[in-house]
Image (spheres, helix red, strand yellow):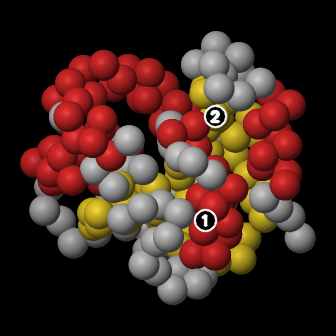
Amino acid sequence: MRRAYDEIGGQLYDLRYAEEQGEKYTWALSRISLKECQPILDAGCGTGAFLEMLQSMDLTAVGVDFSGELLSWARKKLNSSGNLHLLMSDADYMPFRKSVFKSFFAFTLLQNVPDPNLILAEAIRVLQDRALIVVTGLRKEYNLELFHSLLSSSGLKILEESASDLKDFVSICERER
């Protein structure tokens, strides 16, 4: 899978998916409040399109992806400010301590990994209490019942979900108490 993303390259990825991804980002950001100084994690950040939106909001974030080629493209697009960081890593085994981040975003990631439960368990591990988790599930890959089952079995409670006009289910979740 890594080779496929490296071969597609950043420019082609952005041309192919920018509009679709932007709709998901806009939907999620219109429903949550992100604050300065609260670290955000973008797992599977790809070309950094979501990080660009966060940068324009002057937020602190870390983007993680396993494709060196997509991360290289993201580095070219993002300003070299001190509040955004990029890291090459698998999202299911990230090199962070427990309880570091206040928000976790995984856009277009779960359907592209061998075990999405590992990603969600890792999200819970690196998140602080009362953190938000925003994840998407491609409708071609998941029906609503299967997607909800995945989130629930990972210990997540859905707070809000996107309308049906997006190609993905977009869920805003928190950890079950």
Residue assigned mark 2: 137
> What number is the disc on residue 113?
none
Q: Which mark is residue 123?
A: 1
Alpha carbons under labels 1 and 2: distance apart: 16 Å
Describe residue 149's horizontal placement relative to residue 71 as left or right: right
Where's the N terminus, which quadrant?
A: top left
**Kind of residue sitting beneath label 2:** Gly
**Which residue is situated farthest in the bottom direction here?**
97
Visible residue check, residue 1: yes
The local secondary structure at tag 1 comes to helix
Between residues 21 and 27, which one lies in front from this camera angle?
21
- Name which residue lies at 37% across and 60% down: 64
Please name whichever residue, 136 or 88, is drawn nearer the observer in this view of the structure.
88
Asked whether the beta carbons under mark 1 and mark 2 sit within 8 Å of each other, the answer is: no
The C terminus sits in image quarter:
bottom right
User: Residue 3 is drawn in which quadrant?
Assistant: top left
